[in-house]
Image (cartoon, rainbow, N blue to C red):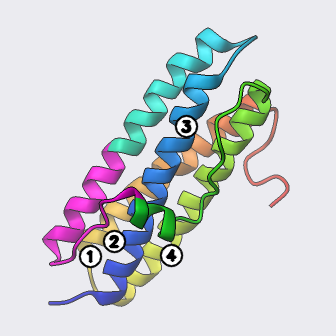
Amino acid sequence: MAYPKTEQVLNQIVADLTQAHMVVHQHHWYMLGHRFIKLHFYLDKVMDQLSDQQDTVAERLIEINGSPISTYEEVLAATKIPDQKGSWDLSMDERLQLILDAYKTLRDDYEEGIKVSAAEGDDSTNDMLIEFHTAIEKRIWLIAAELGQRPGAGE
């Protein structure tokens, strides 16, 4: 059975997970100052989560006879997460806000994927996306709390 709309949304998720990982990795490398030790090691866990989700989503695409995007060129053409050159000039809070924004894009991707996969009757993908959406929401809460924000505030 083919799931063309699910394939499309899964590739969007792969692109955004790849770009989110790059954003987090960049800030992991370029951060300085207060909270460095705490946040540097925390971001290792964040990158692990993104990498695990990226691999699982790409493998699911293959399982449903799709082809995951797999080059940086494809990622940059598809991602909704902005790219910017690394800089030493951002504060820890500015860095976390950029990461939080990337996670909100992922949340929105997963919400779209949940709707699309349900409409196409792809229950296995739907289940995976619901699980990842829940994990992304938790990460949003944690990062927002670190920034002194309530989840969903200002949206």
The residue carrying mark 2 is 126
Spatial separation of the CA atoms under disc 4 and disc 1: 14 Å
Residues at marks 2 and 4 touching, judged by CB atoms closer than 8 Å: no
- Earlier along the polypeptide chain: callout 2 or callout 4? 4
Residues at marks 4 and 1 touching, judged by CB atoms closer than 8 Å: no
**Front: mark 4 or 3:** 3
At label 2, which amino acid type do we have? Answer: Asn
The span shown in magenta is: 52-72
Spatial separation of the CA atoms under disc 4 and disc 3: 23 Å
Spatial separation of the CA atoms under disc 2 and disc 3: 26 Å
Label 3 environment density (alpha carbons within 10 Å; few <14, some 14–19, many ≥20): many
Label 4 environment density (alpha carbons within 10 Å; few <14, some 14–19, many ≥20): some
Residue shown at 26% from the left, 54% from the top: 56
**Front: mark 2 or 4:** 4
Residues at marks 4 and 3 touching, judged by CB atoms closer than 8 Å: no
The residue carrying mark 3 is 24
At label 4, which amino acid type do we have? Answer: Glu
Residues at marks 3 and 1 touching, judged by CB atoms closer than 8 Å: no
Dot 2 falls on a residue whose secondary structure is helix
User: In terms of depth relative to the viewer, which is nearer, 5 or 77?
Assistant: 77
The residue carrying mark 1 is 123
**Front: mark 4 or 1:** 4
Residue shown at 59% from the left, 50% from the top: 103
Spatial separation of the CA atoms under disc 2 and disc 4: 10 Å
The residue carrying mark 4 is 112
